[in-house]
Every structure is written in structure tokens, then in C-alpha cells.
Amino acid sequence: MRLKKRVGHQVPFPEPLRNERDHRPFLAILAIIMLVSFIGVLNHLEQEAITGGAVQAISFVQGGKELHFEVKTGPIKSATIHFTEDTKNAKIAFEEQDPVAQNVAGPIYSVVRVSSEKPISFSVMDLLLKIKEQDLLAKDIAVSDVQLYANGDPVITTLTDKDQTYVYFTAKVTALGDYAVGKKKQEEPVSPQSEQPSPSDVPAEEEEELPAREDSSLVGKAAQEPAAKGSTTFGQKLRAFFSNFFG
């Protein structure tokens, strides 16, 4: 039996299946989205650092209840709102404003605008203010002269605490709007002329006495005049009698 010479033949093994999908475009798009989101977050944080602001979301609060939350915007550290009606799905925004644009006389330390997209019914909002004493002095505002103005009107501002760096005040407001921390208005001094009583301030008794005195003087004059006239007429008659008698 003839053996055939085997020719060296190698059977090629199949190459592993290659994944023909290219994920590089997908990864590039994902990287771009993440980069844009990161830049947006940085811009938002930078804006908050420059202007200062806070938003308090209210999911639901029953009327007659109160809500306390941290603000940390400008001089306002925290706030407590006393609601008078049920409030649902609302937001209260706190944002610092330019003090120059406020219609408040005297130096202003800071202004915070408090607003809401939908009406909120509340009786009062308690504010806690935290301010650096050095910042107040830089604005020419003494601690004893700190005054909170709500929409241009002064409200009672009470000093409650003080440490080496900060001073703390409390105030109550009844409406949203612009809250400006500034210098208390000085009362105008009373001039000496304004202290003198006007003619209308003279007591009624004195007014009644003056005409009475004038009347008495007039009566005296009136009594003297007839007497003077009478004496003169009698003398004339007497002289005329004797002149006729001896004549």
C-alpha cells in the first residue's frame, strides 16, 4: 500500500469576531454634556457668590403654622414666616440689590429683595440679622444707629446679641419687598421759636380777661368825660349869673 506523502498544510483558524461599532462619537458627546453641565454649575455658583441669593421652596404649610429656614443672604441670617392661609407649591426668593438704587436717606449697608412668584398670605415675618461691626463702621453706621427699612419705611430693629466680630438684630416685617439695612434717621431739633406759644395756644381764661379789662378802662373814661363836661357848664352858668347881677 502506497502511502501518500502528506503535504504540510495548515488550516487557518477563524479570526475573532471584531465589534464593528465605534463608541468614540458617543463618548465624545457624553464628555461634552458633562463639560457643559460643569460649566453651568460653576457659573451658577459664581453668580451666587457675587450677588448673593437664596430660594426657599414651600411644598405645603397649613394656615396658622410657621416656617423657619436659613437665608444667609446679605445681612439676613434666617427668617420665620407666620402663615395665615394654606400655602402650597410656593417659592420665596432672597436676592441682594444695589444699595445706590434705594430711596432711603443716609448711608445704607445692604439691601435684600424678598419676592414670591405667587401671593403668600402671612401675618408677620421675623428676621434675624447678622452683621460685621467693622462693615457697619466702614459705612459710617454705629451699632446703636442700625435701622431696617421695609419698602422705605422704618421698622423696629432690636440689638439682641454681640460678639467680637458680629452684631445680631431682630426685626419684624409684614410684607415682601426691599429690606434695606441703613442708618437710623436723626430727629430734627426743635427751634426756640417753636417753643413759644402761639396766639391760638393762649388759655381761654386769659382771652376772656383781656376784653373785660379793656371794657373797664373804657367805662372809666366814659365816666370822666361827662363829669368834666358838667363842671364846665356849671361854671359858665355861674359866671354869667354874677356878671348879669352886678352889671
Image (spheres, helix red, strand yellow):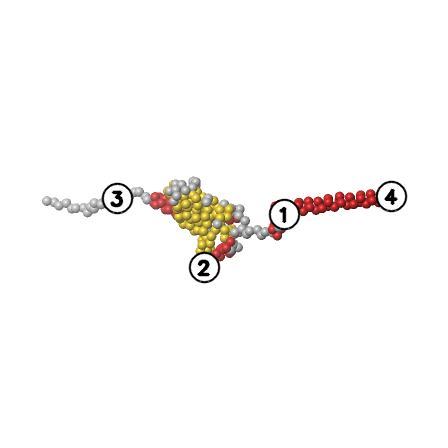
Q: What's the residue type where badge 2 is placed? A: Gln
3 and 1 marks in contact (CB < 8 Å): no
Callout 1 secondary element = helix
Q: CA distance from mark 4 to mark 3?
A: 180 Å
Q: Residue at x 71, y 46 (%)?
A: 220
- Residue most toward the left? 1
- Number of numbered callouts drawn: 4
> What is the crowding at mark 1: few (fewer than 14 residues within 10 Å), some, or many (at least 20)?
few
Q: Residue drawn at (42%, 50%), measured in percent from left and top?
A: 78
Q: Earlier in the sequence, mark 2 or mark 4?
A: 2
Task: First in sequence, mark 4 or 1: give its number.
Answer: 1
Q: What's the residue type where badge 4 is placed?
A: Phe
For marks 3 and 1, the one nearer the N-term is: 3
Q: Earlier in the sequence, mark 4 or mark 3?
A: 3
Q: Nearer the viewer, mark 4 or mark 3?
A: 4
Residue designated by label 2 = 164
- Give the CA separation, mark 3 to mark 2: 74 Å
Q: Which residue is mark 4?
A: 245
- The residue lying toward the viewer, choosing from 187 and 240, is 240
In this orientation, which residue lies closer to the viewer: 205 or 229?
229
SS for dot 3? loop
In the rendered structure, the answer to whether residue 154 lies left or right of residue 232 reads: left
| Visible residue check, residue 199 | no
- Per the rendering, the mark at residue 123 is none
Confirm whether residue 206 shows in the render. yes
Provide the residue designation for mark 1. Answer: 206
Seen at 46% across and 45% down, the residue is 174
Q: In this figure, which residue is indicated by the disc labeled 3?
A: 17
Q: CA distance from mark 3 to mark 1?
A: 123 Å
Residue type marked 1: Glu
Residue 57 lies, in percent from the top left, at 39, 44
